Amino acid sequence: MLRGTVTEFDEGKGLGTVAADDGQGYLFHVIEIADGTRTIDVGQSVSFQPLPKFGKLQAGRVHKL
């Protein structure tokens, strides 16, 4: 699991990005928010599992910290 901070989230599209502590950016979809909520705040600290999807790294199992 990596840690990072949500840098943007578009509630309408259900898409967001996480700036990870490893210096990379990861995309995520709302279905990956582990607590089942449909939103997350920009600036929220999170932990997540990096997943290779569609040729890019994405954040899976996003847990709010």
Image (spheres, helix red, strand yellow):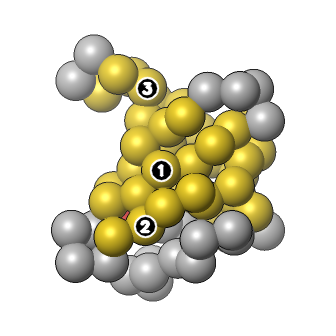
Camera-side residue of 8 and 22: 8
Task: Tell whether 15 sits left or right of 64.
Answer: left
Q: Is the C terminus in the top left, top right, bottom left or bottom right quadrant?
A: bottom right
Q: Which of the two discs, 2 and 3, labels the residue nearer the N terminus?
A: 2
Query: Which residue occupies 69% across, 70% down?
Result: 44
Q: Residues within 10 Å of mark 1 (few under 14, many from 20)?
A: many
Q: CA distance from mark 2 to mark 1?
A: 7 Å
Specify whether residue 12 is in view.
yes
Task: Tell whether 11 sits left or right of 18.
Answer: left
Which amino acid, mark 2?
Phe
Specify whether residue 31 is in view.
no
Mark 2 and mark 1 residues within 8 Å of each other at the beta carbon: yes
Query: Which residue occupies 60% across, 59% down?
Result: 6
Which amino acid, mark 1?
Thr
Q: Secondary structure at mark 1?
A: strand
Query: Which residue occupies 43% across, 67% down?
Result: 9
Q: Secondary structure at mark 3?
A: strand
Mark 2 and mark 3 residues within 8 Å of each other at the beta carbon: no
Task: Tell whether 48 sits left or right of 65.
Answer: left
Q: Is the N terminus in the top left, top right, bottom left or bottom right quadrant?
A: top right
Q: Residues within 10 Å of mark 3 (few under 14, many from 20)?
A: some
Q: Is residue 32 above or below residue 43?
A: above
Residue underneath mark 1:
17
On residue 47, which mark appears? none
Q: Which of the two discs, 3 and 1, labels the residue nearer the N terminus?
A: 1
Residue 20 position in % (x across, y down): 69, 38
Residue underneath mark 2:
9
On residue 57, which mark appears? 3
Q: CA distance from mark 2 to mark 3?
A: 17 Å
Q: Which of the two discs, 2 and 1, labels the residue nearer the N terminus?
A: 2
- Res. 30 image quadrant: bottom left
Which amino acid, mark 3?
Leu
